Image (cartoon, helix red, strand yellow):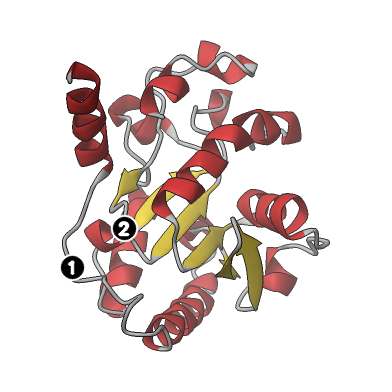
């Protein structure tokens, strides 16, 4: 999966990137956060949400008893758009094959969309619903049938939006409280947040070992 993203030429964004940003976190996470696109810091490091928005995301997670290592974080496009512009619909579509592979691999109980572009992708492409914008959809919980399994979808603002508009921070906190309630309602069999974590690096190493056999 990571190699496929590194070698992807499905849209022009690969020409502008320094590093693709496949995602990061636990592959047995109950929560998958779906953001929009890598920024400058993410492009430099190959890791998602490592700038100021990532710091706020870490704080929000901590407030509901989670750590970054408990969840999985990725974006609807895996390469940085030039000048940090919004990803174009055709770029999101071109990258959707990678996004869907990650969703299948992690198989989360809850998908949290961060911002308009990820919300539109999940609503319109996966749920067949009309996306009315993050302001109207934030805090709402819907069911998504993914690979024959019911997944909860929760939409909220992108943390970067709260950096520009501090009034949104309280709404983000409210939506993360909703996430905490969703996790608390999971059956014990699904609550493996504090169990053994398998990271994307573990997956890569395991795949490499299998190829050597």
Which residue is found at the position 61% from the left and 61% from the top? Answer: 148
**Quadrant occupied by the C terminus:** top left
- Does the rendering let one see residue 90? yes
Q: Are marks 2 and 1 in contact (CB under 8 Å)?
A: yes
Element class at badge 2: loop
Report the side of 188 relative to 114 (left or right): left
- From mark 2 to mark 1, how far is it between C-alphas? 9 Å
Element class at badge 1: loop
- In front of the other: 190 or 184: 190
Which label was assigned to residue 28? 2
Q: Position of residue 170 (x, y in %)?
A: 48, 80
Report the side of 135 relative to 179 (left or right): right
**Quadrant occupied by the N terminus:** top left
Which label was assigned to residue 93? none
Which residue is found at the position 52% from the left and 16% from the top? Answer: 14
The residue indicated by pointer 1 is 195
- In front of the other: 181 or 102: 102
Residue 12 occupies quadrant: top right
Q: Position of residue 128 (x, y in %)?
A: 80, 58
């Amino acid at each position: 999966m990571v190699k496929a993203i590194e070698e992807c030429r499905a849209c022009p964004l690969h020409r502008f990137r320094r590093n693709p940003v496949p995602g990061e976190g636990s592959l047995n996470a109950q929560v998958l956060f779906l953001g929009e696109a890598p920024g400058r810091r993410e492009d430099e490091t190959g890791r998602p949400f490592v700038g100021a928005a990532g710091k706020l995301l870490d704080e929000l997670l901590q407030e509901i008893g989670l750590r970054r290592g408990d969840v999985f974080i990725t974006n609807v496009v895996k390469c940085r758009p030039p000048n940090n512009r919004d990803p174009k619909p055709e770029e999101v579509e071109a990258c959707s094959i990678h996004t869907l592979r990650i969703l299948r691999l992690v198989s989360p109980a809850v998908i949290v969309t961060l911002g308009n572009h990820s919300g539109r992708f999940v609503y319109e492409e996966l749920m067949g619903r009309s996306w009315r914008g993050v302001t109207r959809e934030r805090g709402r919980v819907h069911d998504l049938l993914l690979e024959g399994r019911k997944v909860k979808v929760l939409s909220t603002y992108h943390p970067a939006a709260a950096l520009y508009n501090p009034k949104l921070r309280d709404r983000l906190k409210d939506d993360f409280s909703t996430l905490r309630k969703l996790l608390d309602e999971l059956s014990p069999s699904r609550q493996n947040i504090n169990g053994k974590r398998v990271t994307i690096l573990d997956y890569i190493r395991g795949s490499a070992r299998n190829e050597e056999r």
